[in-house]
Image: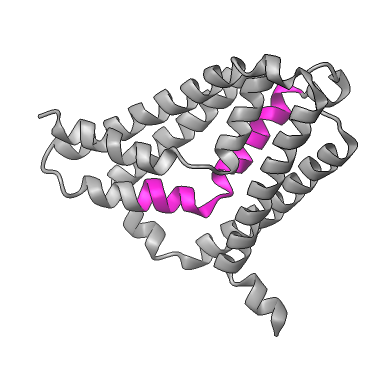
Amino acid sequence: MLTPYFTGMGIGAGLIIAIGSQNAFVLTQGIKKQYHLEVAFICALCDTVLIGAGVAGLGRFIERLPLLITITSAAGAVFLFIYGLMNLISAVRGSGSMGDNSQNIQGRKQVALTALALTLLNPHVYLDTVVLLGSISGTFDGSGRYLFGAGAVTMSYIWFFGLSIGAGLLSPLFRKPITWRILNLIIFAIMWSISYRLFRYSGLIEYLKR
């Protein structure tokens, strides 16, 4: 009876535990210890809603709306380009150390909106949670599909809170500006690489070449 649950945890882990813009933000906020638990909760809650929608069968509806995925891809690409540029500027200026309050302190609302944008403006989150996990859940009979979804949701909470709390242990390393420069450069590279992929996925690059 628990097989669907643990299957959901395993597949969920495979989709969630990957280097991406969302995880990079959770890691950064965890290191800063700046509304890091709220960020982890927002990311996990979004997964809960999306996975639940997928298990309920919304995936088939999403597949019929390619324009929605295209628009989301374009918006996400622009957002990640700007966000990555901000990290590049911080790396060049050497700002962002733990003692640099002007760069370190952000409002709760700003942090929450950034977490939502990094989550919901990535079209792959819909493909992974709503479409893919939703489709796999349909292979289980009866309550099995809901146990599968519950397993994937459980892994989401374990991962995001574990990443956020674990990142806090790295705080002493980030009291030096050079460490923040390296992290900002890494995040810049991640954001721009994902932005480029989203631009290509949306078809904007081919459109602009015309």
Magenta stretch, overall SS = helix
Q: Residue 80 location, x and y as percent?
A: 68, 49
Q: Which residue lies furthest to the bottom in this view?
A: 210
Image coordinates for residue 134, horizontal then vertical, percent: 30, 48
Q: How is the image coloured?
A: one colour
Of the pair 112 and 58, the residue shown nearer to us? 112
Report the number of numbered marks. 0
Q: Can residue 52 be seen in this view?
A: no
Residue 112 drawn in magenta: yes
Position above or below: 173 against 56? above
Say if 38 sits above or below 84 in the image: above
- Frontmost residue, 84 versus 124: 84
Task: Locate residue 12 relative to residue 66 in the image: left or right.
Answer: left
Which residue is found at the position 78% from the left and 34% from the top? 181
Q: Give the x, y percent position of residue 171.
A: 67, 16
Tell me which segment is drawn in magenta: 107-131
Q: Is 29 positioned to the left or the right of 184 in the image?
A: left
Task: Check the picture and name the quadrant holding the C terminus.
Answer: bottom right
Q: Can residue 197 be seen in this view?
A: yes
The residue lying at 66 percent from left, 34 percent from top is: 113
Q: In which quarter of the image is residue 53?
A: top left
**Quadrant hosting residue 30:** top right
Frontmost residue, 126 versus 25: 25
Left or right, 208 with reference to 7 = right
Residue 12 appears at what percent x and percent y? 34, 38
If the image is split into quadrants, where does the N terminus sit?
top left
Asked if residue 136 lies in the magenta stretch, the reply is no
Front residue (pair 27, 47): 27
Taking 14 as reference, is 110 above or below it?
above
> In the image, what residue occupies the spot 43% across and 36% down?
47
